[in-house]
Amino acid sequence: HAKSNGRSNFQFYTQNLDVEAKRRTTIEEELRHAIERDELYLYYQPQISLVDNQMSSIEALLRWKNPRLAMLAPDEFIALADETGLIVPIGSWVLEQACRQLRYWQQANHPELRIAVNVSSRQLEEPDFVNTVDRILRQCGVGPRYVEFEITERLLMKDNLKNNAVLRALKERGIQVSVDDFGTGFSSLSYLKHFPVDALKIDKLFIKCLPNDEHDAAIASAIIGMAHSLNLKVVAEGVETVEQRDFLRDLGCNYGQGYFFSEPVPPEKII
Ligand code: C2E
Ligand code: MG
Ligand code: MG
Ligand code: MG
């Protein structure tokens, strides 16, 4: 009995793997054509200064709507785009769209507004990444100091030396770099000493239970203190309540982002 049971479990397992593999292949195949079929678009979420409540910058967040697939979460299809390398053309598309949109807002009446764009390590590893960035910014008429790249802590750790050279090239141009999902990368802090980054984004995991959870309060406070001693700005992501906002502001956190201020929205809702 035990044996046949084990066997049917095994069949069930391989069948699931089959379904999973098929689904991945379908998604990959669809994603390959997503740009030309006009299925990608960006949502935007403001980052708010906790000092003066001004909208200082806006993060562009990728969305994908495909008629043959259910709406996919960015975490899911971006991981696949990363593995397959499709994130390279998609990432260029995102940067160009976001910069065009920023230019529009700047000309409308927010000349100092900045745009934050998520960048994958696959893009940093491309030999002509910096040239591509230069070209897109030039074509869109956006100054480098209005652009922030968000790179997750996990990815930053991957290839120290090469990433570091690219980050320096970006910094020379005045582009800002933020460490995204800070605190979740299982990393040593030593990279902060060598990497030319400008800001840390505290992962929403640590914000969620503020202000009541003592441990999270201690972690948030420690990250903010450390960041400031290193001359880095701090952004808290996932701010959902006024209590969280007030608590973070009192700790000296520079910026907040989250549903309390606004969900990610289509561009026409930003102004
Ligand atoms: P992220 O860069 O850390 O972006 C923040 C995520 O938190 C977004 O999820 C946003 O919708 C969500 N969020 C914002 N405020 C709140 C809040 O108050 N509460 C909660 N619970 N969540 C909040 P989203 O849009 O699903 O994106 C997920 C991740 O996908 C991003 O995390 C980023 O790592 C990646 N991503 C999105 N767009 C791009 C892109 O264009 N390129 C690359 N490489 N990655 C991207
Ligand atoms: Mg981000
Ligand atoms: Mg994040
Ligand atoms: Mg994230």
Image (cartoon, rainbow, N blue to C red):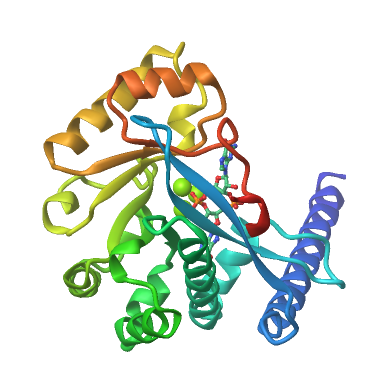
Residue 139 occupies quadrant: bottom left
Query: From where the camera sits, is residue 150 visible?
Result: yes
**Viewer-closest of 105 and 265:** 105
Which residue is at 63% across, 42% downward?
Answer: 263
Which residue is at 51% across, 31% downward?
Answer: 239
- Judged left or right of residue 235, residue 21 is right
**Viewer-closest of 226 and 10:** 226
- Judged left or right of residue 110, residue 163 is left
Residue 152 occupies quadrant: bottom left
**Viewer-closest of 15 and 32:** 32
Above/below status of 168 relative to 225: below
Question: How far across and down, in percent of the image, does residue 101 sit?
Answer: 54, 67
Which residue is at 36% across, 18% downward?
Answer: 217
Query: From where the camera sits, is residue 157 visible?
Result: no
Residue 43 occupies quadrant: bottom right
Above/below status of 162 relative to 151: below
